[in-house]
């Protein structure tokens, strides 16, 4: 079953950047890619406890601020040491200038 | 038979072993480590207590990748003529290529024999498990390990006195303004800092300072730097000069032997450097793996280092040069970054400190600016409203 949640406005996220979104005690990360697509993943690194929202987005990679672990935010794939566990991803849709993610 | 042997199952050796497989190596890989534990990360040893080790990879990971992990095995000597190593149990292992990733060991100056040091999980257990109210801890050395230990100890209510011979903290690693910010925080947290004072004598129950003062303590820990573990290389006739000397590919003077991580001295920007940096150990391990398989590229990654003390994190990219001035970028909440440029205007270092990951993004962008050899406009570096990504991409701000 889906559970779509209104996460933010399209303009809240800059191109090639991300923001943090908290819902129901969980932290998510909402990304806007260089070609203006939106994606969502868990908001905490899989290595240690670090907020990905403090990290750097370059193309389709989010780099963790703490030890530079890298993930492809479209698939959640961990791109090598020190991170080896993938990030969970969530479906995203954009409607009327708002970004929704399916947290189910 | 293992055709590639790696000596030292630390951050560097482990990374090299996995990188060999990632690069398509199909032959045998043996990873020989002196420690009894599954290879673990060292940085948490001074940052968290009590000490549950954070392992680098599960045992099954080594099995799946076909890496023969040999624990409790010490290499005693390298026979270059016959291309084999001798282990502490007397057995010999042949190699086609050998990687020395033996890391470093904690230094003790004469007179400090009675002090504990903090390098391994076993060291950490002996120290961290004792922390708490009622313990008086004396730390010799205001480098990052001593300071991280001081922070961890204070958080647990331990009484902490830290003695540093230099006039300021972390003199080897960061600019003075950052060291001052950290010193202020340690004092505010109740750690006693004694700067500009050497140590005359260390006992298990205290320290006598050079000026005659006595610091009573229940435990004394020395954090006065590390020495590269170079004995095997030196005895095998390889060149050693503050680390095992390697070329840009991380090869030693013997084309079948490579060295990487804390134990090696490598060329960087026309100088020779030896780092004690976790990310560098990983990157060099991966680079040495590719080099052993024939890759000719030179290792050129910009040095990067971090330290966590209380809720503050400091990060340094590049190599700070005390002879250069700096440009300061204030990020709010007390966080700031100091940038240094060389005579030609190229960015050469960025050192920042702040709560949590406040400086991380800008430090990472600064690192990429250095990698590209760019000459950023100092007014842009100074202005926190300027996104350094635009500087990196050369987009006019
Ligand atoms: C307490 C502590 C905190 C740290 N915090 C940070 C930090 O915040 N940020 C940062 O960037 N860096 C930090 N570091 C540094 C970082 O951990 C090192 O740079 C990194 O571990 C180096 O990896 P290495 O594999 O080269 O060496 P090591 O990790 O030292 O591993 C070498 C291994 O080789 C083994 N060995 C040596 N000789 C032999 C032999 N003859 N036969 C078999 N095995 C042998 C050793 O037992 C050891 O296990 C910290 C280090 C310590 C000790
Ligand atoms: S916490 Fe993300 S890489 Fe370590």
Image (spheres, coloured by chain):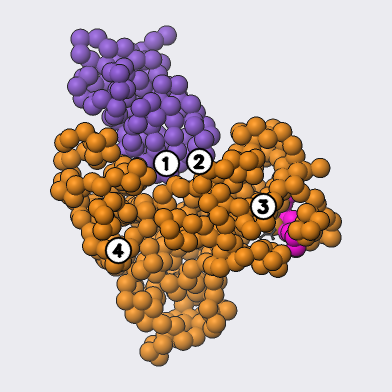
Q: Residues within 10 Å of mark 3 (few under 14, many from 20)?
A: few
As drawn, A79 above or below B53: above
Q: Residues within 10 Å of mark 1 (few under 14, many from 20)?
A: some
Disc on the earlier residue, 3 or 4: 4
**Percent of width and height locating residue B270:** 43, 58
Q: Residues within 10 Å of mark 2 (few under 14, many from 20)?
A: many
SS type, badge 4: loop
Q: How far is disc 1 from disc 3 in space, using C-alphas?
A: 32 Å
- Label 3 marks which chain's residue? B
Q: Which mark is residue A68?
A: 1
Q: Which residue is mark 2?
A: A82
Disc on the earlier residue, 1 or 2: 1
- Label 4 marks which chain's residue? B
Q: What colour has chain B?
A: orange
Q: Is mark 2 within 8 Å of ligand 2?
A: yes
Q: Are marks 4 and 1 on the same chain?
A: no
* Pointers 2 and 3 in contact (C-beta within 8 Å): no
Q: How far is disc 1 from disc 2 in space, using C-alphas?
A: 8 Å
Q: What colour has chain A?
A: purple
**Percent of width and height locating residue B256:** 69, 51
Query: Does the stretch in magenta take in B155?
Result: no
Q: Which residue is mark 3?
A: B255
Q: Are marks 1 and 2 on the same chain?
A: yes
User: In this view of the protein, can residue B46 be seen by the observer?
Assistant: no
* Pointers 1 and 2 in contact (C-beta within 8 Å): yes
Q: Is mark 1 within 8 Å of ligand 2?
A: yes
């Amino acid at each position: 079953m889906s559970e779509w949640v209104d996460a933010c406005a399209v303009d809240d996220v800059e191109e090639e950047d991300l923001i943090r979104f908290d819902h129901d005690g969980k932290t998510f990360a909402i990304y806007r890619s260089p070609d203006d697509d939106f994606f969502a993943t868990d908001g905490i690194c899989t290595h240690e406890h670090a907020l990905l929202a403090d990290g750097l987005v370059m193309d389709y990679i989010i780099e963790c601020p703490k030890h530079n672990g890298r993930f492809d935010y479209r698939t959640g794939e961990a791109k090598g040491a020190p991170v080896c566990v993938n990030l969970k991803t969530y479906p995203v849709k954009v409607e009327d200038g708002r970004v929704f993610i399916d947290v189910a | 038979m293992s055709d590639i042997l790696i000596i030292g199952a630390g951050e560097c050796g482990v990374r090299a072993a996995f990188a060999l497989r990632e690069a398509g190596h199909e032959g045998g890989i043996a990873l020989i480590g002196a420690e009894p534990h599954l290879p673990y990360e060292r940085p948490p040893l001074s940052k968290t207590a009590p000490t549950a080790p954070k392992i680098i990879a599960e045992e099954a990971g080594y099995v799946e990748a076909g890496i023969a992990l040999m624990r409790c095995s010490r290499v005693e000597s390298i026979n270059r003529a016959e291309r084999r190593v001798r282990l502490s149990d007397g057995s010999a292992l042949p190699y086609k290529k050998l990687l020395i990733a033996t890391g470093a060991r904690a230094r003790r100056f004469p007179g400090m024999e009675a002090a504990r040091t903090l390098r391994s999980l076993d060291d950490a257990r002996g120290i961290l498990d004792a922390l708490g109210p009622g313990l008086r801890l004396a730390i010799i050395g205001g480098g990052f390990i001593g300071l991280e230990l001081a922070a961890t100890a204070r958080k647990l209510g331990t009484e902490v006195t830290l003695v540093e011979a230099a006039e300021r903290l972390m003199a080897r690693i960061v600019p003075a303004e950052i060291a001052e910010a950290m010193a202020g925080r340690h004092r505010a947290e109740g750690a006693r800092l004694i700067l500009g004072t050497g140590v005359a004598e260390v006992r298990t129950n205290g320290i006598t300072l050079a000026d005659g003062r006595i610091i009573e303590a229940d435990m004394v820990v020395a954090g006065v730097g590390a020495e590269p573990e170079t004995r095997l290389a030196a005895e095998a006739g390889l060149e050693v000069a503050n680390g095992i000397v390697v070329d840009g590919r991380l090869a030693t003077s013997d084309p079948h032997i490579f060295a990487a991580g804390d134990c090696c001295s490598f060329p960087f920007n026309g100088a020779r450097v030896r780092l004690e940096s976790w990310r560098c150990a990983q990157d060099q391990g991966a680079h040495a793996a590719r080099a052993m398989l024939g890759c000719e590229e030179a290792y050129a990654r910009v040095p990067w280092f971090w330290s966590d003390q209380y809720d503050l994190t400091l990060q340094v990219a590049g190599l700070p040069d005390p002879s250069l001035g700096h440009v300061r970028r204030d990020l709010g909440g007390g966080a700031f970054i100091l940038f240094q440029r060389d005579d030609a205007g190229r960015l050469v270092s960025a050192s920042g400190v702040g709560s949590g990951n406040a400086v991380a993004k800008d430090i990472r962008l600064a690192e990429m600016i250095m990698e590209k050899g760019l000459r950023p406009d100092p007014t842009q570096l100074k202005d926190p409203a300027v996104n350094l990504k635009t500087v990196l991409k050369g987009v006019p701000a």
